[in-house]
Image: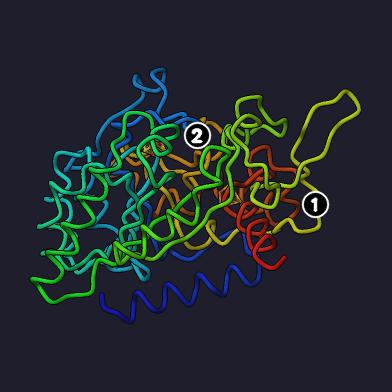
């Protein structure tokens, strides 16, 4: 197997997406891996941050991780995203997993983290040289604002972690990993956005503003929940979704809005593997009930057996026919939000 195998798998993925086939290429060209579904914070509007979620959390075992790497390595064209529904740096074997990826010539495109534990791994992360970007969620330029959303977090820990990474990069004379600060706009921080942007500049980080997500949407609901309504910014251009009011006064997501993106490249390009080996089309469904495609069980059931199984093919057919008829994807937080946000940038 070679780079040519990876390239051919990629080309096949592009082609099958283009013709809207229900059968994808042999393997996904990219993976999102959930190293850990445990989180050290309790963010508002995040189910992973609620105490009720504690029973369903864990860390990906090294055995499972090694099996995944062994299987996907020859086909992985676009590298790995480390994300999921927890904080990856709570995985005690985080560094050994990174080292395994390095040994197997696999790149991490983005490590998504809350950044509070970054300092303890900074040296080894930079040393590994395989993580291209670290994306860090920061919703405030002051501790007071930051902790309104990121409950239990200390902004100074995040800043210290970023500074440590920058120092190590300097010592090693390298530009990677790049630091990306992602800020979701809420009512709590909308007056502080420019300060967060300045902070990002001072930390030599890229800065990206994200529209406010809806708790109800990541739970698969159209009706906007009261908690989300409390958190939404005053600037409606920064809401991830267009909404409308029903006859009985409910606020609901307008799933037929003309700006709605009607496709999904995830179903042809990437798959999401949870810490326990469950495979989902993506990481958006926080209920774990709408997008589950199968369960890894090596040596009998690997990614290949699931990637084109009946569930996946049915999913692709449904999305390609009418995305608004899918019980979860109709409120897809990934594509709905992105379209909405790009509109707000133009106006
Ligand atoms: S840090 Fe991320 S996973 Fe943890 S509670 Fe906050 S949003 Fe959820
Ligand atoms: S929720 Fe969005 S990204 Fe996930 S499978 Fe559905 S359309 Fe694709």
Q: Position of residue 285 (x, y in %)?
A: 53, 38
Can you say whether 203 is above or below 314 in the image?
A: below
Q: Secondary structure at mark 2?
A: loop
Q: Residue furthest bottom?
A: 4
Q: Give the label on residue 166, or none.
A: none
Q: Position of residue 149 (x, y in %)?
A: 45, 34
Q: Secondary structure at mark 1?
A: loop
Q: Position of residue 108 (x, y in %)?
A: 28, 62
Residue for badge 2: 286
Left or right: 274, with 261 as reference point:
left
Is residue 347 or residue 311 the one in the foreground?
347
Specify how the rendered protein is coloured.
Answer: rainbow
Left or right: 231, with 256 as reference point:
left
The C terminus is located in which quarter?
bottom right
Can you say whether 3 is above or below 156 in the image?
A: below
| Residue drawn at 17 percent across, 75 percent down | 174
Is residue 30 or residue 40 the one in the foreground?
40
The N terminus is located in which quarter?
bottom left
Q: Residue furthest right?
A: 247
Q: Residues within 10 Å of mark 2 (few under 14, many from 20)?
A: some
Mark 2 or mark 1, which has the lower sequence index? 1
Quick check: can you spot residue 103? Answer: no
Residue for badge 1: 257
Quick check: can you spot residue 279? Answer: yes
Is residue 88 or residue 273 the one in the foreground?
88
Q: CA distance from mark 2 to mark 1?
A: 24 Å
Is there a contact, CB below 8 Å, between mark 2 and mark 1? Answer: no
Can you say whether 86 is above or below 21 in the image?
A: above
Can you say whether 278 is above or below 115 in the image?
A: above
Write down the quadrant of residue 344 in the picture: bottom right
């Amino acid at each position: 197997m070679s780079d040519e195998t990876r390239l051919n798998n990629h080309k096949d993925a592009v082609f099958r997406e283009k013709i809207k086939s229900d059968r994808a290429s042999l393997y996904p060209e990219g993976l999102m891996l959930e190293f850990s579904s445990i989180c050290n914070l309790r963010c508002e509007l995040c189910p992973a941050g609620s105490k009720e979620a504690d029973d369903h959390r864990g860390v990906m075992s090294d055995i499972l991780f090694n099996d995944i790497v062994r299987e996907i390595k020859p086909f992985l064209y676009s590298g790995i995203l480390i994300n999921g529904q927890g904080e990856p740096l709570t995985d005690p074997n985080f560094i050994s997993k990174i080292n395994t990826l390095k040994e197997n010539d696999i790149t991490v495109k983005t490590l998504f983290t809350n950044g509070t534990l970054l300092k303890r791994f900074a040296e080894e992360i930079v040393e590994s040289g395989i993580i291209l970007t670290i994306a860090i969620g920061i919703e405030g330029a002051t501790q007071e604002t930051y902790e309104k959303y990121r409950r239990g977090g200390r902004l100074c820990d995040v800043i210290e972690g970023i500074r440590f990474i920058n120092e190590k990069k300097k010592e090693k004379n390298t530009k990677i990993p790049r630091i990306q600060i992602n800020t979701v706009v809420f009512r709590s921080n909308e007056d502080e956005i420019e300060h967060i942007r300045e902070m990002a500049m001072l930390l030599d980080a890229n800065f990206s503003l994200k529209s406010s997500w809806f708790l109800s949407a990541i739970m698969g609901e159209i009706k906007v929940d009261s908690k989300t309504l409390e958190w939404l910014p005053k600037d409606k251009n920064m809401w991830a979704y267009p909404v409308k009011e029903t006859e009985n006064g409910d606020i609901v997501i307008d799933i037929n809005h003309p700006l709605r993106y009607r496709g999904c490249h995830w179903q042809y390009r990437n798959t999401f593997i949870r810490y326990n080996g469950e495979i989902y089309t993506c990481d958006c469904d926080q209920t774990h009930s709408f997008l589950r495609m199968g369960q890894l069980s090596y040596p009998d059931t690997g990614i290949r057996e699931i990637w084109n199984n009946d569930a996946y093919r049915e999913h692709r057919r449904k999305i390609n026919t009418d995305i608004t008829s899918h019980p979860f994807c109709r409120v897809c937080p990934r594509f709905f939000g992105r379209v909405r946000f790009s509109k707000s940038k133009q106006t």
